[in-house]
Amino acid sequence: MRERPGQKIKLKTIDEMLGVVGEESAMEIEIEKIHPFRNHPFHVVDDAKMQDLIDSIRENGILSPTLIRPVGNDEYEMVSGHRRMHAAMKLGMETIPAIIRDMTDDEAIVKMVDSNIQREELLPSEKAFAYKMKLEAMRRTAGRPSNNLSQNGTNFRVDQEIANQVNESRNQIRRYIRLTELIPELLDFVDRRRLQFTVAVEISYIDKEIQGWLFEYIRENGPVKLNQVKELRTALQTGAMTQDKMIILLNGTQKASAAGSLTLTDRKLREYFPPTYSHDDMMDVIEALLKSWKAQNGGDSDDV
C-alpha cells in the first residue's frame, strides 16, 4: 500500500454519504488487492454513463475516493466505488484513491447499499436484492428489543427506516424483496419489462419448478396477466399441477378474460345514433335489440 503522492485528500463533499470522520484520508491502493463486494446487487455495465465516467477520470482523475475495508492478507473489499474502480481498470490504472475503514459485514452492507440506492436508473432486481440485504443487516444489528418494544415493533421500525430513506412505502419495499424469490429468468423478464411488476410479485409465491414452466410459457406466448397467475395459484392449492394442465389453465383464463372485456364506448356508439340521443337513450335501444335477438334465437325474452 502506497500513500498517494502529494497532499492527502480530505473528504468534504462525500462526508454525509459515507459517514467519513475528519481524520480519515485517502490512500492510493493497488487495484489488484481490491475485491468486489460479495453478492454485490448493483450491476456495473459499460454503457454511456460509464463512458462519461471514464472520460471524466481520464481528464480529471478520481475526485471522490472509494471506500474499502480490510479483509486480511493485505487485501480489501470494495464497499463504495465499484463503478470508479471499473472505469480506472478500463483506463489501465494500477491504483485508485481509497479510504480504508474497519467495518463489520452488516455495517459494510448498509454502507454499500446506501451509496448506490439513490441512483435513478436502478433495475427492479437491483432494488430487490439491495433492499433485502440492507433489511437483513439492519435487523441483525438492531439487537434485542427493550422490555416495552416487541420484536414485531423492532421489525416495523427497521422496515419503516428503509422506506423513509428511499421514499417508498413499507409494502412496496416488501414487494421488491419478494422479487428475490423469482428464478433468474423471470427476474430478467421483470428488468426487461416483459413481465409486469405486480404479476411478478404474485408469481414469487409459486414453486420454482412451476416458475420454470411459466418462464417457458411467457417466452413462447408473451406476458401473463395478474388474473391468470391468481387462477394458477388457486389451482395449485386444490391438487397436483403438471405443465400441460398449467398451459390449459392459462389459455382458458386468457380467453375468458378476453371474452369479458367487451366495451362499447359512447364515442363508438355515436356512429349509430342521432346526436340528440343521450347515453341512457342509446342503452335502452341496445337492450331492446338484445332482447329481440334473444327471442328470435329461442331464448327467454323476459330476462336478459
Image: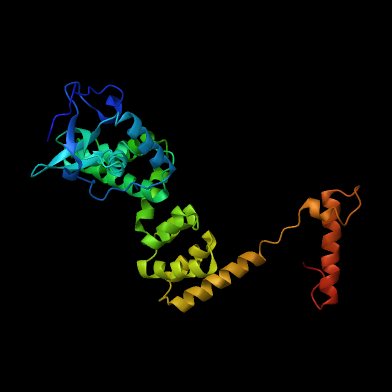
Please, is residue 270 above or below residue 229 in the view?
Answer: above
- For the point 47% across and 78% down, the residue is 244
Where's the C terminus, which quadrant? bottom right
Looking at the rendered structure, the number of numbered marks drawn on it comes to: 0
Q: Is residue 170 left or right of residue 223?
A: left
- Determine which quarter of the picture holds residue 155: top left
Look at the image and name its color scheme. Answer: rainbow
- Determine which quarter of the picture holds residue 143: top left
- For the point 50% across and 58% down, the residue is 194
10 and 207: which one is in front?
10
- Determine which quarter of the picture holds residue 190: bottom left
Where's the N terminus, which quadrant? top left
Residue 133 seen anywhere in this rendered image of the structure: yes
Residue 175 seen anywhere in this rendered image of the structure: no
Please, is residue 201 above or below residue 94 in the view?
Answer: below
Q: Position of residue 248 (x, y in %)?
A: 53, 76
- For the point 49% across and 63% down, the residue is 230
Please, is residue 175 above or below residue 150 in the view?
Answer: below
22 and 27: which one is in front?
27
141 and 26: which one is in front?
26
Q: Position of residue 276 (x, y in %)?
A: 91, 47
Q: Position of residue 56 (x, y in %)?
A: 37, 33
Q: Position of residue 289 (x, y in %)?
A: 85, 65
Q: Is residue 125 left or right of residue 64?
A: right
Residue projecting furthest to the left? 73
- For the point 36% across and 66% down, the residue is 208
